């Protein structure tokens, strides 16, 4: 691989991975804040309103860091990936512009109203401001997913005389079936992050012995939402996304499962190490015929392996793709198990006193971030060697005039700046956690 291409890929991978740490929480918290506001209005309970205000502050910090880290990615399309921008800009420019003009401004404007307008708005108007923030954040996610879905499964385009892509059907672009499955799967993943973070903070307060009324609310809402979205992440959204891959990117499916040979009744690998050189799985733990059934709903269905495709069409790092996919699936399965146990304890009114479960919930906080990162790595590594699937290879899309040294210089600069931003983010969030959902907790005498 060209050294400049490698640097550009690492550069964009770093900036987008760091950036997505923040939007996944804002998109995940947005519906939960609406739920807290709804419960506060219905029950006329100030505790729920305090909980909503607390999480709105966490939302605002994440939103700010998301904006600061998101803007450089827009410039990278021009600086590091100019050939790709020239080739596909007539399509992806539409959805990226709509994300900024419609959803971003909707989200940011009403976030200001929600954070600072509660005393000036009626209770119902304040609830609608929370709903607008939720709609704006999820609409933002939709336009970004439509952009990526075009790169995965291009539709609604025509080639211009100069060879570039132009939009021929906006309807087809928005109704791309790949986009809808990917959007549902991505947003349920973001909701899992929001739910687990909320439950984790609630568990922290209960173990700490402070803000216990709010902590119980955080754990209750987080566990219920976490269970619902963890199940949805598996089915139907994960199943639907997997079947889209099998239909449109069968070589990607083979690489995700490290299925080197085409075979009927293909097994599902639970554990094992892909040996690409010898084209086999070392130390496999398999479920016989399960991959055939999950993919085609038939136990003896024929599943294409990597041997059915020329090596130059294989994803370029089969092992990393395999591990990313299995980390995502493994953590998703653990989330279902943890949330199911927590939900049973909640139903039996034992969760808040089960310190072992509260410790599990608190320590679970980083794992949805790992799972979402692994999921996006699966999507982007799986698309390789294509930038726009079947139309433009990655090797043809980067800026040929930007040398590896220039790219490395800016990458090191981003490392430094994002380290500072990360420290600032942790400081601000920890300060809010210490202050808690109320200015001063009442102490019984």
Image (tube, rainbow, N blue to C red):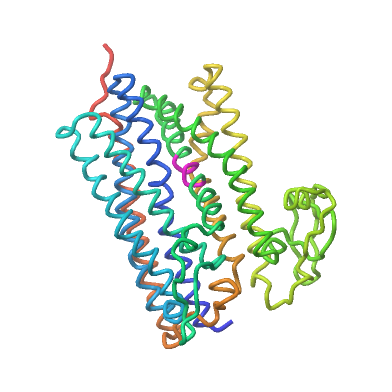
Q: What secondary structure is the stretch in magenta mostly built from?
A: helix
Outermost left residue: 120
Residue 130 shows up from this direction: yes
Where's residue 260, x and y in %? 78, 65
* Magenta segment boundaries in residue numbering: 189-194
- The C terminus: image quadrant: top left
Q: Decide which of 389, 226 is in the foreground and name it.
A: 389
Residue 408 shows up from this direction: no
Q: Is residue 289 above or below residue 365?
A: below
In the rendered structure, the answer to whether residue 370 lies left or right of residue 273 reads left
Outermost top residue: 445
Q: Is residue 282 above or below residue 313?
A: above
Where's residue 187, x and y in %? 48, 47
Q: Decide which of 303, 330 is in the foreground and name it.
A: 303
Taking the spot 46% from the left edge, 61% from the top edge, the residue there is 171
Q: Decide which of 19, 205 is in the foreground and name it.
A: 19
- The N terminus: image quadrant: bottom right
Where's residue 374, x and y in %? 56, 56
Taking the spot 54% from the left edge, 73% from the top edge, the residue there is 387
**Residue 89 located within the stretch drawn in magenta:** no
- The picture quadrant where one finds residue 443 is top left
Q: Is residue 438 above or below residue 403?
A: above
Where's residue 162, x and y in %? 46, 87
Taking the spot 43% from the left edge, 59% from the top edge, the residue there is 144
In the rendered structure, the answer to whether residue 173 lies left or right of residue 378 reads left
- How many numbered discs, if any? 0
């Amino acid at each position: 691989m060209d050294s400049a291409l490698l640097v550009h890929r690492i550069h964009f991978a770093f900036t987008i991975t760091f950036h997505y740490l923040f939007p996944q929480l804002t998109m995940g918290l947005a519906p939960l804040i609406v739920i807290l506001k709804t419960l506060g209005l219905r029950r006329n309970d100030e505790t729920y309103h305090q909980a909503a205000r607390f999480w709105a502050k966490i939302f605002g910090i994440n939103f700010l860091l998301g904006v600061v880290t998101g803007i450089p990615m827009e410039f990278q399309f021009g600086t590091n990936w100019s050939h790709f921008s020239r080739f596909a800009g007539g399509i992806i420019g539409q959805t990226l512009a709509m994300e900024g003009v419609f959803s971003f401004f909707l989200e940011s404007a009403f976030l200001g109203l929600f954070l600072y307008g509660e005393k000036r708005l009626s209770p119902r108007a304040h609830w609608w401001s929370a709903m607008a923030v939720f709609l704006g954040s999820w609409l933002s996610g939709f336009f970004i997913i439509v952009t990526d879905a075009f790169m995965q499964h291009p539709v609604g385009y025509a080639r211009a005389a100069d060879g570039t892509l132009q939009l021929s059907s906006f309807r087809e672009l928005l109704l791309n079936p790949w986009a809808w499955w990917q959007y549902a799967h991505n947003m349920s993943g973001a909701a899992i992050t929001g739910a687990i973070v909320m439950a984790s903070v609630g568990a922290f307060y209960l173990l700490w012995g402070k803000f216990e009324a709010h902590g119980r609310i955080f754990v209750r809402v987080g566990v219920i939402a976490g269970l619902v979205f963890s199940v949805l992440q598996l089915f139907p959204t994960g199943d639907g996304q997997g079947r889209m891959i099998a239909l449109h990117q069968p070589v990607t499916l083979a690489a995700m499962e490290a299925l080197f040979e085409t075979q009927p009744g293909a097994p599902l690998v639970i554990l094992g190490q892909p040996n690409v050189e010898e084209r086999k799985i070392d130390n496999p733990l398999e479920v016989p015929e399960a991959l055939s059934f999950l993919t085609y709903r038939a136990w003896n269905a024929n599943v294409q392996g990597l041997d059915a495709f020329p090596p130059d069409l294989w994803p370029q790092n089969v092992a990393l793709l395999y591990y990313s996919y299995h980390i995502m699936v493994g953590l998703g399965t653990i989330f279902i198990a943890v949330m199911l146990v927590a939900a049973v304890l909640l139903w039996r009114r034992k969760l808040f006193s089960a310190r072992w479960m509260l410790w599990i919930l608190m320590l679970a906080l980083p794992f949805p971030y790992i799972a979402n990162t692994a999921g996006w790595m699966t999507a982007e590594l799986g698309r390789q060697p294509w930038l726009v699937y079947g139309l433009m290879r990655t090797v043809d899309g980067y800026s040929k005039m930007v040398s590896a040294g220039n790219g490395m210089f800016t990458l090191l600069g981003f490392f430094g700046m994002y380290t500072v931003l990360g420290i600032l983010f942790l400081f601000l969030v920890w300060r809010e956690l210490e202050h808690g959902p109320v200015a001063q907790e009442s102490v019984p005498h």
